[in-house]
Amino acid sequence: MAIAGNSAASFLQLHQKKPHSLFRLNSRNSVPFSIKSSFNPPMASLAVSSSTLGLSETFSKLKKEGKVALIPFITAGDPDLSTTAEALKVLDSCGSDIIELGVPYSDPLADGPVIQAAATRALARGANLDSILEMLNKVVPQLSCPIALFTYYNPILKRGVEKFMITVKEVGIHGLVVPDVPLEETEVLRREASKHNIELVLLTTPTTPRERMKSIVEATEGFLYLVSSIGVTGARGSVSEKVQSLLQEIKAVSNKPVAVGFGISKPEHVKQVVGWGADGVIVGSAIVKILGEAKSPEEGLKELAEFTKSLKAALL
Amino acid sequence: MGKGQPPLLIGWGLRSRRPLWLIRYKRVGRMYFCRPAKKQLLKRKMLTLSPQIHSSSENGPEFSIANLDKAHMDVDRDLHGDVLIEGLSSLLGPIPLAQQSILGPFPAGPGIASNPRRSLLLHQSPVSLGHQLITGTSSLLGMECPLQVKYTCGSGSGSHHAYQTLPFQIRMAFSSATPLHRITAISSSSSSSSPFFKPYPSQLSLQFNKIASCSPKSFALANHQMGLDKAPVLHDLSILQRPDSLGRFGKYGGKYVPETLMYALSELESAFKALATDHQFQKELDGILKDYVGRESPLYFAQRLTEHYKRPNGEGPEIYLKREDLNHTGAHKINNAVAQALLAKKLGKERIIAETGAGQHGVATATVCARFGLQCIIYMGAQDMERQALNVFRMKLLGAEVRAVHSGTATLKDATSEAIRDWVTNVETTHYILGSVAGPHPYPMMVREFHAVIGKETRKQALEKWGGRPDVLVACVGGGSNAMGLFHEFVDDKDVRMIGVEAAGFGLDSGKHAATLTKGEVGVLHGAMSYLLQDDDGQIIEPHSISAGLDYPGVGPEHSFLKDTGRAEYYSITDEEALEAFKRLSRLEGIIPALETSHALAYLEKLCPTLPNGTKVVLNCSGRGDKDVHTAIKHLQV
């Protein structure tokens, strides 16, 4: 598998080294480019060894069943990677439809104190992308729901966008959320992600003007991440009323599934958001807090299971 | 060389896929005199040129030069009306010879094979997303391709034209799609005293329609008059390139922030552009800079320092200090703080947040908030608060709330992240006064423009003092605001050398330094793509420097761009060398500099022996050192 991966990567590089490929970027002559884009390295097809569906497929399946997706978020490596591995299994068995896995980063601009602290702890423990992917390699085959990685742009850039996509696909990741890349800069990411069948999820917020929101909805893959309030992640007392009108606006423009995140921490919030028409609910800080503040990892996992079940109950 | 020569093939149009011809008339040294080719030749080639161009030929051909990231050309007009193309070698300077071969074979004509530097005139910048940049030389008269070749400013729509040109005095009367006369018409009407009156690319497209097309003939005359006053017009146009409408300097810059902030950033940008042409705002700002900040700051000839660097035979450079340390609050930071506070008031925001490392920017922000009656919250790393206790007290005295940041490494980068998070949460009521030319667009552009007054004054003062321009500019670089303020005015003056000095902490190999441009790699930090110090996993690492103001793991994107294009040079200085310089200036001139400035002063030790006699060196004395005496006490024996 690794050898095939290497050859795939080098094959791709060979394409890139041609000098006139630079000019092709301007796609005046787009034929060679389309050939390139339809080339899927053998790794991509091999990696989907698990029977899990992609993000949009999951959503369409749920829609047929009339259900709303539960999307929990945890930070990889907090309190340690083995706990994260267990937590992923727990979340999966308690009924999560998609799991968002956060890669810890030293300067998370979109995260509130809970997830920040979790990232600091994870980094102090030595968690890095390689170790996280190693862990995922073992765990993903045992999961029934797809995983989306939540990471900031710099670690992706450091590896190289293409290489990142290849490595991540090898492990079986289905989706990617990068909160600090705005729509204008997502071109490169989207191109590479779609080449490797990874769905790049884009975010929209209450401050986004309508026209821009429409472009974001058109460009997003998998689902649309609707940020419920103006701010960073973190549990809030209640969900902002604006979410309802935003959901209506988005639904009017597109059929793509919309998941609401940031600040949802209780089953009541979940019910409220579902009542407004969301296709998915993302719960982050509340879950990270449980794992982080637990007296021991086992305790944490138990509480996590209970909490997830209560959230799932609110969805039914 | 002469009329008998056939036109020279010097390149291949990438967009138009046609050969580009240089019609030379005569060559004198490195300079090429050109005349338009004979009418038949022109007619054959000028498929898209309007006949009006021919009629303007009695004034000599006038043309513009499209400029690109890495190469540019000076065009000047000589007394006889011949067009002089100067500095072709400077055109090719930064372009490696390897790239020339991409553009196709060059004929082995005279002057081409012998000096390949004269032959390459096309370059496609491969790194800029959304930039489609092709240039041709201005001498390619009668060429349909170069005249159509445009620098499209990243907006994606091909019709958005902008030109950047280096100091030149001639404009080309093109046919229809010539934004150039519009550009000149705009710039001639705006006053030269405002700190930021340059037309920005997106602004340009609006004015595109407003200005009626003028006949080339009258335009040529008007041009000639306009062309006679050099600096203001020319420099406006060159700024169009930096940044473009997406906020990029080449591949650096941009707006890598959470989506919540995108609207606020575009609102800020439009407010900034609107105020650029608002005379009331200019006047108010100039008044405050003069009466409250105490501008203009002197350009001081450091006699004893100059003596110190004289070589045994009595030769050596002349060192001038731009005394930004004499500003109110003791540093250059106030220039930006004052302007941004005024901007915030215009936007109707009552709450101001800022981050600070050394405390100087925090003090400047607290000062202006007290002056304008705004609520002020400063984020400072817990470690920095210990190092700069004096500044913390000052900020509190001025009425600001100082919030300690304990996350991450508790230094400037974490304070900046926390400030950005606060802004994300309170974006509707809050304005974020970023202290340096880093951060998401439009901050690098705004902060640079607000500090550009430093360079403008330097130019004026240099002219008064020695009737010329500085030869070398030296400034310390942390985020890069004081350096950009000094450099910006002179970026287009090719003969002015620009040197930025970073902090090497314990040494570049020790791993404890803040030499971002020397040792960093390209990445995204706090909203901008730029060089930064990161580890193998892409995590931002904590830098170290004795001076808190240089202790930033990133750098402004424009500095990254200037470094890559080779326009500016960047070196680094260790803590020890900085402390030596700190002592030296105090002893020799009676000026106690900030530790940040001491880094720039320390570089003079290495620089001055290499400079010829009489070189004018202007060093930006960006802050005074009263705040650093506590640190100095620990390290120095006096």
Image (cartoon, coloured by chain):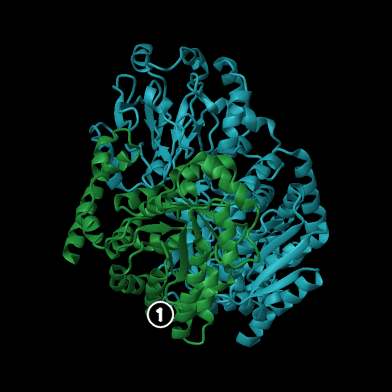
Residue drawn 42% across the image and 45% down it: B129
Q: Secondary structure at mark 1?
A: helix
Q: Is residue B534 above or below residue B463?
A: below
Residue drawn 35% across the image and 48% down it: A191
Tell me where residue A179 appears, x and y as whole percent: 49, 58
Q: Is residue B231 above or below residue A44?
A: above
Residue drawn 71% across the image and 79% down it: B389
Q: Mark 1: which amino acid? A: Thr
Q: Chain of mark 1?
A: A
Please tell me how many numbered marks the rendered image carries. 1
Kindly indicate which chain is depicted in green in the rendered structure.
A
Front residue (pair A289, B248): A289
Q: Could one spot residue B111 in this view of the protein?
A: yes
Q: Could one spot residue B512 in this view of the protein?
A: no
Tell me where residue B471 appears, x and y as whole percent: 55, 53
Q: Residue B357 sits in which quadrant?
A: bottom right
Kindly indicate which chain is depicted in cyan in the rendered structure.
B
Tell me where residue B109 appears, x and y as whole percent: 25, 31
Picture quarter with the N terminus of chain B: top left
Tell me where residue A122 appears, x and y as whole percent: 45, 77
Is residue A22 shown left or right of residue B303? Answer: left
Front residue (pair A176, B58): A176
Front residue (pair B335, B80): B335
Residue drawn 35% across the image and 24% down it: B23
Picture quarter with the C terminus of chain B: bottom right
Q: Residue B341 sits in which quadrant?
A: bottom right
- Find disc 1 in the rendering and name its residue: A83
